[in-house]
């Protein structure tokens, strides 16, 4: 299976519940992996930016924005390379790809995390674009906002999971 096969439409005739199967399972998996690596890049970029801010003479806001935008770039590149390598090495065949895409769509936690990431990425991209006009070029600020929003979606998702678990514990007493 090659990289181009990731963009093929699925043959729905072999699935009983074909309405739940993504039309393009390769793109579904690629989007999922890229989203998670962008989240990782955002977290690493934020922590790395804070950690290295003591050693640079630039203002903290512009240093963090550049560090966060590098996190987004890392996430997109790393995610694409990872899925491409899996496809090229034969670790991903058409059936396995369709199965993974289907299971991702059925996993409520993954769907919730993806929705939170999309919403927070858009919100923070807008905030960074408007709030820091002198810190960096617009494209860098937008990438930084996406990265920061992605990182914050992990925090909000984990917080909501803990809150829901505690509510279940209290409710069962």
Image (tube, rainbow, N blue to C red):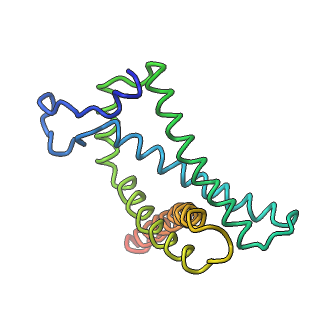
The residue positioned 44% from the left and 19% from the top of the image is 90
Residue 52 lies, in percent from the top left, at 81, 60
Q: Is residue 157 above or below residue 79?
A: below
Q: Is residue 124 above or below residue 101?
A: below
The residue positioned 51% from the left and 71% from the top of the image is 124
The residue positioned 60% from the left and 58% from the top of the image is 42
Q: Quadrant of residue 16?
A: top left
Q: Quadrant of the C terminus?
A: bottom left
Q: Is residue 164 left or right of residue 97?
A: right
Q: Is residue 9 above or below residue 20?
A: above
Residue 9 lies, in percent from the top left, at 23, 34
Q: Is residue 13 left or right of residue 58?
A: left
- Looking at the image, which is closer to me, 71 or 32? 71
Q: Is residue 8 above or below residue 27?
A: above
- Looking at the image, which is closer to me, 47 or 75? 75
Residue 49 lies, in percent from the top left, at 74, 62
Specify the farthest residue to the bottom. Answer: 131
Q: Quadrant of the N terminus?
A: top left
Residue 138 lies, in percent from the top left, at 57, 68
Q: Quadrant of residue 99?
A: top left
The residue positioned 25% from the left and 42% from the top of the image is 22
């Amino acid at each position: 299976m090659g990289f181009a096969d990731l963009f093929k439409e699925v043959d729905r005739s072999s699935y009983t519940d074909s309405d739940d199967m993504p039309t393009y399972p390769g793109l579904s998996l690629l989007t999922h992996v890229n989203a998670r690596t962008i989240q990782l890049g955002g977290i690493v970029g934020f922590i790395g930016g804070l950690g290295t801010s003591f050693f640079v003479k630039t203002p903290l806001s512009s240093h963090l924005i550049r560090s966060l935008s590098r996190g987004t770039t890392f996430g997109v590149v790393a995610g694409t390379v990872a899925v491409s390598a899996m496809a090229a090495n034969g670790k991903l065949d058409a059936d396995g790809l369709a199965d993974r895409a289907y299971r991702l769509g059925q996993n409520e936690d993954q769907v919730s995390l993806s929705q939170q990431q999309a919403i927070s990425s858009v919100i923070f991209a807008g905030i960074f674009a408007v709030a820091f006009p002198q810190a960096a070029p617009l494209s860098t600020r937008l990438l930084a906002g996406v990265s920061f929003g992605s990182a914050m979606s992990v925090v909000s998702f984990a917080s909501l999971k803990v809150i829901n678990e505690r509510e279940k514990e209290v409710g069962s007493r």
